[in-house]
Amino acid sequence: MTQARIRNFSVIAHVDHGKTTLSDRILEMTGTVSRREMRDQLLDSMELEREKGITIKARAVRMAWTGRDGQEYELNLIDTPGHVDFNYEVSRSLAACEGALLLVDASQGIEAQTLANAYLAVEQGLEVVPVINKVDLPSIDLDVIREDLRTTLGFKDEEVLLASGKTGLGVADLLHAVVERVPPPAGDAAAPLRAMIFDSHYDAYKGVVAHVRVVDGLLEAGQRILLMATGSSSLLPELGVFAPEAVRRERLEAGEVGYVATGLKAVADCRVGDTMTLADRPAAEPLPGYRPAKSMVFAGFYPTESDAYPELKEALEKLRLNDASLVYEPETSQALGFGFRCGFLGLLHMEIIQERLEREYGVDLIATSPSVEYRVITHGGAEVLVDNPAELPDPGSIEEIREPWMKVTIITPTSYVGPLMDLAQSKRGIQRDMSYVDPTRAMLTYEMPLGEVIVDFYDQLKSRSQGYASLDYEMFEYRAADLVRLDILVAGTIVDALSVIIHRSLTMSVGRVLTQKLRTLIPKQMFDVRIQAAIGGKVVASESVKAKRKDVLAKCYGGDITRKRKLLEKQKEGKKRMKMVGQVEIPQEAFLAVLRIKDEL
Amino acid sequence: MRGIGLYVHVPFCAARCPYCDFATAPAATALRTRYLDALAAEARREGNALGRPRARTLYVGGGTPSLLEPDEVGVLAAALGAAFDLRPREATLEANPATLDAARLDAWRAAGVTRISLGAQSLDQRGLAALGRTHQVSDVAPAVAAAHARGLAVGIDLIFGWPGQTAADWAADLDAAVALEPEHLSCYPLELEREREEADANWPGGGWPVVVRWRARAQAAAPQEDAVAAMYETAERVLRRAGFRHYEIANWARPGMRAQHNLGYWRNEEWLGLGAGAHSHLGGARSRNPVSLVEYVRRVEAGEGRTPDPAADEASDTAMLALRTDEGLDLARHAQRFGAGAAGSVRAALASLDGTGLVRLRGDRARLSPRGRLLASEVFLRLLPP
């Protein structure tokens, strides 16, 4: 196919705005999948994706479509992940396209994330085709949505298409618009190969499979390729396209999208955004925009039962095969035993990994409170990166602690502006801007520490706006802050898993809440147990659990010795499940409960 | 043969006490006659099987055995006398103060009873009401007097920590009990189980939800752990001054008046239990009868024996039981009886409690300290095999 008749496009939409359903209709309308073969949500292949309704892994599907000019076109639909944590992956998917359909839910209007992705597409020079989706819904006001599109992105009313993924209405027009408005690829077919990897996954039979967009040159099976960022090199055993099942091809030409079985053994060797070239005729320059995956959120994962450590390790290894953005290293906690410090792209990424570990691998785990990566400047001028509060250097040696700040965009119905501003303020947010998307909806822009964003901000945002507000954020800069580590001591021993790095102004209130909660959770011991919250050696809050005075099965007659024994055995079992901090037995649930309330502070 | 302890269970009660977790059944049950027949049959069978052993102690417990009619008492006594060499140094009858009339007392006296264990529970009318008891405070003194008049030793059972009870209430209860001059006192903190008990099957009309609701309410209204612990310490102090020896976690006695039958349990000696829910410990093996009257009667009538209780571990049971008493655990004897390994693990377990002050070790003898009695479970669960 000549480049002139190729169209590469993706669909940008907020979660729940119907991207997947519309994609399914497109596959159907182009005859790529018959209605009979159609499973709902074909592009979301992971069980979890289906359940959460979120697209985690990008996929590309090749389709054939006859344009209004009677010519046959090759359309490549590149799916994009729909969540803020996968911003970089989205940007790479977009970089593989010349155009994008911007999907707006007719009943919801533009959301923060839609806007962020639309800006991303515009910045990358993509032709954006606005589509109002779900127009079959009753009581919708298309004029309001058109106004949204006009004010926020400058679309003219006549550019806006109407569609319904549910009924199929307007889908053909939309495909025609892709053909007519999205420019064809403009790569140099004669130049050395440059193919951009916009996704990769691990296949048990084929090894790492990369999804690529050939920008320049020609890619053929049997060639030796070189990945320019990681330096990995291998012979290509197989390549092809998804339509939507894998179909082998001998070659992929400039402008085309397809898959490449790389022969590599780990997705970490085949990074999203990397440029694939030929080992014997390499390109001079890689494609722009590569960035190694950067962990933003960190947490300790510990098996609930300490003997399940090998299972957790194996499960993480397997997950990592498929997810280069998951990083982890072994970590030991006095309180929780052996586990792993894990780094994630964001909170959702963390939740997904946690759920997959529990669901797909059957590992029961405790996750410590999520933390961000702090840059600690010591008096000596050295910079230390700290993502685990327990590893913060001695306060006396610290010159300054810097924390990551985000640019946060919130779009909300105007009636919730007040409560959301209060929320942002309580999270140390600094307001930068406020504007109106349309008469009923406002856009708030804040600068906010990531450490605050990852702790209950999203849930609060949703609950204070009754689910109507939407959120997008991007990394902004590191800023110095008056941060301290708050330790929790039980009977004089620091419970490492409960340490937090927080703003100095919050230490008293957080310390009080944590110690009070722990007092109710730590069972009475044979001695008084002091529970303290402290910064360095300075105690900011203190509680105590009085010694247990009575624990006896007083009535023991006749043969009920066996029953007493069973009661004792039950009690002993309970003790076994406790974690020892010094001499104090603390039930697992206490850690869980405290970690939970820490998320709510 | 050294002889055994003989326990006979009479499950019948005039009313169901909502805190009670023993094998009970309504006094008016249609199974009453069949039960008593089964009891006699079981006595015959077991007496034969064991070669009419000597019963060193007899304990007729319940339930409320004191509500048996005099003729029923006579039949039961005859059956026991035929099956066993019944010359006990102590024969105890558990009695409800309201049921102890002269005719019944005489019948039991004639059957050889030497001691009455009186379920007074409280000498405060509010306490009896809080515990759902049906007898009156005014029933207690006459019952004690009647027993004493017949030369019977008297033990009084008290429960403390009932809903609404104050420290002063408890001190008054203790004083009132001491004033009755019993030879023996048992004081238990109110312990409320929430797991459905097998005895529920014997009570028609689905009483369990009511029992559980009562227990939940009682638990909520009962004094806190610290207050209950303080009550226990009050009992220790008051009863010591009154001349009682605290010889087991929940038991006090005048010199020479310890409950011999119960001591047999705590020394993990041999006993045979007859009747529904009764447990036995014979030849190093534990076994039990079903709590359900229907099932018990069926088994006896079908000639089926007791169910073995495989969970037992003789060495650790013996250690735990011994530590309940003021005799304590003699580690040298323990080693003789169960081997050096068993004694070694007891020593290791006790060593893990060093510094807690729960156990006192003098030479080979380990005893619970006063604090250790209140925290006995902390000690005992360390004695369980791993």
Image (spheres, coloured by chain):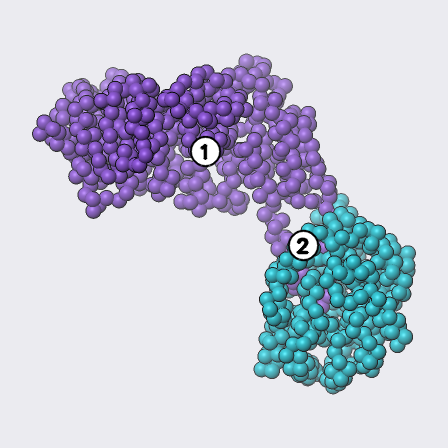
Residue A453, x across and y down, in percent: 48, 26
Looking at the picture, tell me which residue is in the foreground, A56 or A467: A467
**Label ID, residue A558:** none
For chain B, give the colour: cyan
Q: Would residue B238 appear left or right of A28 to someone viewing this image?
A: right
Q: Amino acid at mark 1?
A: Gln
Q: Is residue A118 visible?
A: no
- Write down the residue under mark 2: B217
**Do the residues indicated by labels 1 and 2 lie within the same chain of the protein?**
no
- Which-is-in-front pick, marks 1 and 2? 1
Residue displayed at 63% across by 59% down:
B212
- Please tell me whether residue A17 is drawn above or below residue B19 in the rendered image: above
* Display colour for chain A: purple
Above or below residue A534? Residue B179 is below
* Callout 2: SS: helix
Q: Is residue A136 left or right of residue B104?
A: left
| Image location of residue B77, percent across then percent down | 76, 82
Q: Quadrant of residue B81?
A: bottom right
Question: Residue A173 location, x and y as percent?
Answer: 18, 30
Answer few, some or many: residues within 10 Å of disc 1's Cα (few below 14, many 20 plus, some between 14 and 19).
few
Q: Chain of mark 2?
A: B
- Residue at the far left in the pictured view: A70
What is the spatial separation of the Cα atoms under label 1 and label 2, in whole angstroms? 39 Å
Which three-letter amino acid code belongs to the residue tagged 2?
A: Arg
Give percent across and percent down for residue A32: 18, 38
Residue occupying the point 65% across, 25% down: A536
Q: Is residue B67 visible?
A: yes
Q: Which residue is mark 1?
A: A466
Pointer 1 chain: A
**Do labels 1 and 2 touch, CB within 8 Å?**
no
